[in-house]
Image (spheres, rainbow, N blue to C red):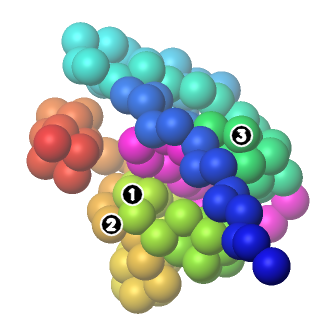
Amino acid sequence: MAKTKKKKPSTTNKILVVDDDGQMGLVLQMVLHETRFELDYVNDLLSAEEYLKKQQPLAVILDNKLPDGYGIDFIVYIKQRYPSLKIIMISGFGLAREAALEVGADLFFEKPFDLDDFNEGIEKLLK
C-alpha cells in the first residue's frame, strides 16, 4: 500500500493573533506595523484550530483566557500538531508564565507589557 503525503500548509510572514480583546489586536498592529509581519486575527480557540488547518503562520500570539478555553491548554494542541510553530503567550496573569513556558510557549509577556520589549522578542524569535 502506497503512503500518501499529507500536504503541509505553506509558511508565510503571517502571525496569528488569538485574543478576544479587540484593543489588544490594535496594540499589536501598532507595535508590528513597521515589521515584515502580517497579522491575522481570531477571537477563540476553535477559530484558531480551523485557521491552523488551512495555513501555517510563523507564530501564534495567544492570550490565555479565551471564551472557549485557556491558551495554555491550546499550546499543548499546537505543539502536538505543529511542533515547529513558535508561540508567544500574552496574559494578564503573570502566574501563567511558568506553566506556559513549561508546556511549550517560546515567549511570555504579561499584560501590560513594554511594546519595545515585545517587538524585540518577536524579531529575535522569528529571525
Q: Residue at x 50, y 48 (%)?
A: 60
Q: CA distance from mark 1 to mark 2?
A: 6 Å
Q: Check the image and report above or below for 98 versus 43.
A: below
Q: Check the image and report above or below for 15 versus 79.
A: above
Identify the element where label 1 is drawn: strand
Q: Is residue 84 left or right of residue 24?
A: left
Closer-to-camera residue (35/100): 35
Neighbor class of circle 2 (other Cα within 10 Å; few <14, some 14-19, many 20+) is some
| Mark 1 lies on residue | 86
Q: Is residue 59 magenta?
A: yes
| Mark 2 lies on residue | 106
Q: CA distance from mark 3 to mark 2?
A: 22 Å
Q: Check the image and report above or below for 96 versus 13.
A: below
Q: Earlier in the sequence, mark 3 or mark 2?
A: 3
Q: Quadrant of the C terminus?
A: top left
Q: Nearer the viewer, mark 3 or mark 2?
A: 3
Tally of numbered tags: 3
Closer-to-camera residue (125/31): 125
Closer-to-camera residue (124/58): 58
